[in-house]
Amino acid sequence: MTAGEHDPTGALGQDGAAATGARVSERPKRLTDMDLPDYSVEQAKAERRANRRSARRRMRRESVLDEEGEALIKDYDQGMMRRLLTYLKPYRLQFGLGVGLLLLYSVLVPAFPALIALAVDRYVVAAQEPYASLTIDERLNGLLWVVLAYLGLRLVNFVLRYGYTYAVAWLGQRIVYDIRSQIFAKIQRLHMGFFDRTPVGRLITRITGDVDAIQQMMTDGLVGLVADVGMIVFLTVYMFSLNWRLALITLAVMPLLFLALNYIRLQQRTAYRAVRLRTSISNAYLAENLSGMRTVQLFNREQRNARRYDELNLDLLEANFEQVRWFSLFHPTVQLTSAIATGLILFYAGSTLIGDPFTDVVTIGMLVAYIQYSSMFFRPLQELSDKFNILQAAMASSERIFQLLDTPELIVDKDEVVGFESGFRGEVEFRDVWFAYDGEDWVLRGVDFKIEPGESVAFVGHTGAGKTTIISLVSRFYDVQRGAVLIDGRDVRDYDQVELRRHVGIVLQDPFLFSGTIRSNITLGDDSIPLERVVEAAKFVNAHEFISRLPDGYDTVVRERGAGFSTGQKQLIAFARALVQNPDILLVLDEATANVDTETEELIQDALEKLMQGRTSIIIAHRLSTIQNVDRIMVMRKGKIIEEGDHFELLKNEDGYYRKLYELQYQEQGAAASD
């Protein structure tokens, strides 16, 4: 028995029920066992702990892959950094001001231990001439001037630090604003095929989490790195000018420290890449489940989806633990090296002072200053751990952001496009059009047809026949691989995309409402459209009646995705949206009445009949009752047009495909009515 046939005798009743019961009882257990009693999160954690080594190997492999498992094409770190630094060009003056204040700050800070050494050697201990000969009052007076100089420089230090911190924070926010704007603009220009294969959660991660990582690099990482390096340089100059022997002792431990830090940095980079990758995958899965929550709950998929999310969450937990493991090793490594350097300084200086406490080689003030210098010298190195983490996160994020920004824009305008002086006449022609969404899996195969200006044409056929693709190609959401799509005798690729779509009114089967008001959803935020025109369009599609009954009318708040509105109401608002733009010639409707009740459908059909007068209209239909009055019907099957004519001409062909579709549909309706 084929689809659409029914059993008028009822002979299949008992046997059919028995067969159905047998099929249900034969279902695999896993399809009906929705609670998954054999799954335990704690057991899954224990298994991962037992396989920690293999997990780390997998993490290293993932660190060079993107979300789709493909090799991540990237520049070297220096190349990516240079590209990031191009965002600084518009703010060169602000950047120069921040760096200038920062360098002054770095020059000033090492002076404080030198002032303390001066105070101790000249006015506190005063063991050497000419300071040993000073009176108590002279020593106190000299000490007072040193203290005043110390406090004055501290005040200047405060102003410099406030100035460069504010300048750098301002700079970072402006750069982040530019990057976010560039990413959003890029996403807006990408072709529909990109969104067909890219999860929304992944794009949200790019424009939020990844950009935040770059913001932190600009505000804390990059300039902070300059501050730390500048501090180390100026400290080195001060230390060598004070005592070159103690300076060499301090630097003696540096080669070992740099080797250790470089190894830790490479491991941190791997962990950070894995964190960014797994965060993106987790967000994409979460966004998909939130969007499909009704289906999840309808089919009792909560437990299975929770199990899958646990797996993704545990992957992310592993990567974060790996990141924390290497981060935790950084501080102790720097502190241990600092302690070794301080011990060597104390031993050398102490042994010198024990032999001759008044030697010129090392003084007590010099020892006090060098202990501070040693602490100050390794403090920037210790803070570099945070800078390295910030830079590693930014490198991992910038790889993915640049990969998005470098995505080819397949639907682009020519250098010289055709202008619009008086709009379209409305002639639409397909010439030997071949089109595939993926490779050579052809959706349309050599399609040829021509629609005259003002003609209404409907496309019918089974799902997957290529009907909706016709709409997408006319609107140039995709470009054909072979052949050409023409409007008024010119290839659609010759027109400016924005102007082309301004002349095309589209109502989709699944209407989308944005957060805002009913009026803003009809006008799409175009304040130049007066309220009178909005009301006129709503009345034309019979939407004004239900809108006027709402408490705030056209200013009624619309929540995300139109929550609170019925499918029919959303469809009527979408119709008003298409009409208020007043497409000059071409109106494209994609099964726009598929999700409304019979009464609403009659209202919409009445409006459409008036709307289609004098306009070229392309209608994609599944219910054949909605297209009986169009000028021409094209029947599609497997990407080809196999029949063409009006409703009555096609019904005359008893062996025709359209007649079979018509009879099958009315048999189904008759069976439903009898039930």
Image (cartoon, grey):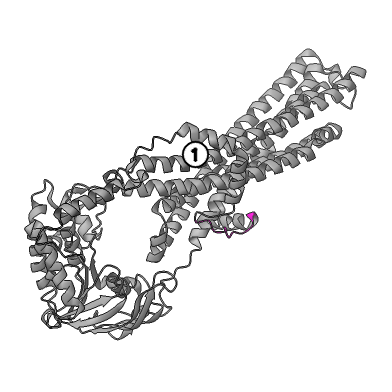
Image coords of residue 207 (percent x, y)? 44, 51
**On the picture, is 601 further left or further right than 290?**
left
The local crowd at label 1, few if under 14, some if 14 to 19, many if 20 or more residues have their Cα within 10 Å, is: some
- Could you tell me residue 31's position as x and y percent? 34, 46
The extreme top residue here reads 136
Q: Amino acid at mark 1?
A: Leu
What residue is drawn where x is 80% and y is 33%? 250
Q: Residue at x 33, y 44 (%)?
A: 301
The spot of residue 300 in percent (x, y) is 30, 43
Q: What residue span does the magenta drawing correspond to?
A: 68-77
Q: Is residue 425 visible?
A: no
Residue 533 shown left or right of residue 429 in the figure: left
Q: Using the rendered view, name the quadrant where residue 431 is placed.
A: bottom left
Asked where in the image residue 591 lies, by quadrant, the reply is bottom left
Magenta stretch, overall SS = loop
Q: Is residue 71 magenta?
A: yes
Q: Pick the residue in front: 8 or 591.
A: 8
Which sits in the foreground, 163 or 196? Answer: 196
The front one of 437 and 137 is 437
Of residue 240 and residue 14, the one placed in the foreground of this image is 14
From the image, which quarter does the N terminus lie in?
Answer: bottom left
- Residue at the disc numbered 1: 314
**381 versus 479 height, above or below:** above
